[in-house]
Image (spheres, rainbow, N blue to C red):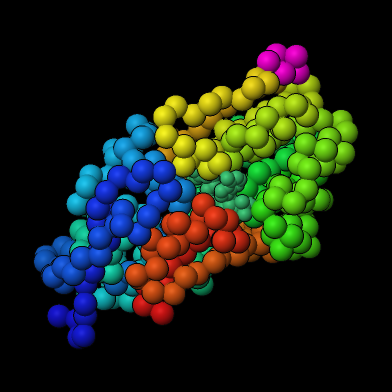
């Protein structure tokens, strides 16, 4: 038994109506899980908050099963093995996986598959660049966006977890990268630390005029995290044979009913352009390829990253709500036991 242990989990209490509210979650005390033969006990140290969770809570999306009312909130986590009857995961091993919003869990490596965090890699990096958002950036930008040297690449949600990595991968591929993000602090970070050529603060600047000014020959790749009006701006400024990567559309996630499409999609025809959506889970068989590529860029110092870490397990609902206000720079995480 773990001394002074106190196990808790967040369960889904209600499907969000409009914006996510604290009452959509229920914090529940549950017994400490006891590992049996062939199992490990994991103490969760970090958990993620991600915009896609809203779709799982609402039962709006169909690429994964919705979270049922009363189920543990789904989410990625990183933790440490406290007790082990699995030779591959001895006590003290750092692991990550689909842990859900809970403090402790038991796994036999099949019920909740475990991934070892490589020695020397901080758990926060494992959930950020080497986690699901880093993988999303990798496959979305490189497989679908296919940036070429000299291309102009535009990224929205550019200071978030996915956008910040996607933009840097395009820069590493030799493209000139323009970011769109909310606020001057984020824009400064994109240019001064991440090597974007320029950044547009969509909250205080005329995004349409700035994109036209910064991309006079058009946008070759647009990596879309936000949808809505910014997608319309990108569509109006395409280069011939442009690629639009539909990764997400957070500006519309709080709307009920069907999401309205772009007004000016016909520019895809005039520009002989392509717009393609993707779900990162479809690339599972190639995750190891992306992790080794991302690790190489981390090791060479070309790929920078940042985490916004809220302190304390009870902050998880706030961490998720904050994404919709843009409070995070880089990956939004919660340190479970600060
Ligand atoms: N296709 C896939 O398989 C896949 C996988 C993972 C994630 N995604 C999608 O990728 C996107 C980014 O996810 P993430 O986890 O990396 O989150 P994130 O970008 O770290 O955080 C969300 C960001 O969205 C921006 N935002 C919030 N409301 C907005 C609005 N109304 N208009 C414009 N921007 C807004 C905020 O930044 P600002 O301050 O700049 O507004 C906020 O920081 C999401 O759309 C997500 O659903 C897709």
Nearer to us in this view, 3 or 139: 3
Q: Which residues are magenta?
A: 266-271
Q: Inspect this view and state whether residue 123 appears.
A: no
Q: Residue at x 36, y 43 (%)?
A: 17
Quadrant (top left/top right/bottom left/bottom right) for the N terminus: bottom left
Image side of residue 1 versus residue 292, left or right: left
Nearer to us in this view, 130 or 181: 181
Which of the 4 image quarters holds residue 141?
Answer: top right
Nearer to us in this view, 208 or 225: 208
Which of the 4 image quarters holds residue 189?
Answer: bottom right
Q: Could you say where residue 62 lies in the image, as x and y percent from the top left?
A: 35, 32
The overriding secondary structure of the stretch rendered in magenta is helix
Number of numbered discs: 0
Q: Residue at x 68, y 30 (%)?
A: 232
Q: Could you say where residue 122 lies in the image, as x and y percent from the top left?
A: 50, 70
Image side of residue 7 versus residue 279, left or right: left
Q: Residue at x 72, y 32 (%)?
A: 233
| Residue that lies at the very extreme toward the bottom in this rendered image | 3
Image side of residue 146 versus residue 70, left or right: right
Q: Could you say where residue 14 lies in the image, as x and y percent from the top left?
A: 27, 49
Q: Residue at x 28, y 69 (%)?
A: 103
Q: Could you say where residue 95 lies in the image, as x and y percent from the top left?
A: 36, 65
Which of the 4 image quarters holds residue 263?
Answer: top right
| 316 inside magenta stretch | no
Quadrant (top left/top right/bottom left/bottom right) for the C terminus: bottom left
Q: Inspect this view and state whether residue 210 appears.
A: yes
């Amino acid at each position: 038994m773990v001394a002074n242990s106190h196990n808790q989990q967040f369960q889904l209490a209600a499907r969000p109506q409009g914006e996510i509210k604290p009452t959509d979650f229920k914090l529940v005390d549950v017994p400490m899980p006891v590992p049996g033969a062939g199992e490990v006990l994991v103490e969760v140290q970090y958990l993620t908050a991600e915009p896609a969770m809203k779709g799982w809570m609402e039962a709006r999306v169909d690429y994964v099963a919705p979270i049922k009312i009363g189920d543990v909130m789904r989410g990625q986590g990183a933790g440490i093995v406290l007790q082990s009857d699995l030779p591959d995961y001895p006590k003290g091993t750092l692991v990550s996986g689909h842990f859900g919003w809970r403090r402790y869990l038991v796994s036999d490596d099949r019920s909740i598959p475990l991934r070892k965090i490589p020695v020397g890699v901080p758990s926060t990096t494992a959930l950020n660049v080497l986690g699901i958002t880093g993988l999303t950036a990798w496959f979305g930008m490189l497989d679908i966006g296919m940036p070429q040297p000299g291309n102009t690449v535009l990224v929205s949600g550019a200071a978030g977890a996915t956008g910040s990595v996607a933009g840097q991968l395009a820069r590493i591929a030799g493209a000139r990268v323009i970011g769109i993000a909310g606020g001057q602090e984020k824009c400064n970070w994109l240019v001064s630390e991440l090597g974007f050529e320029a950044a547009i603060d969509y909250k205080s600047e005329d995004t349409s005029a700035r994109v036209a000014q910064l991309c006079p020959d058009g946008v070759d790749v647009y990596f879309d995290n936000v949808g809505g009006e910014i997608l319309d701006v990108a569509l109006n400024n395409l280069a011939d044979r442009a690629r639009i990567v539909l990764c997400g559309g957070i500006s519309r996630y709080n709307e009920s009913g069907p999401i309205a499409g772009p007004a000016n999609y016909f520019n895809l025809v005039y520009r002989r352009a392509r717009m393609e959506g993707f779900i990162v889970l479809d690339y599972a068989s190639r995750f190891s390829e992306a992790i080794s590529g991302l690790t190489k860029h981390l090791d060479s110092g070309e790929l920078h990253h940042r985490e916004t870490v809220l302190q304390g397990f009870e902050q998880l609902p706030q961490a998720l709500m904050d994404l919709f206000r843009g409070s995070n720079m880089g990956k939004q995480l919660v340190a479970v036991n600060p």
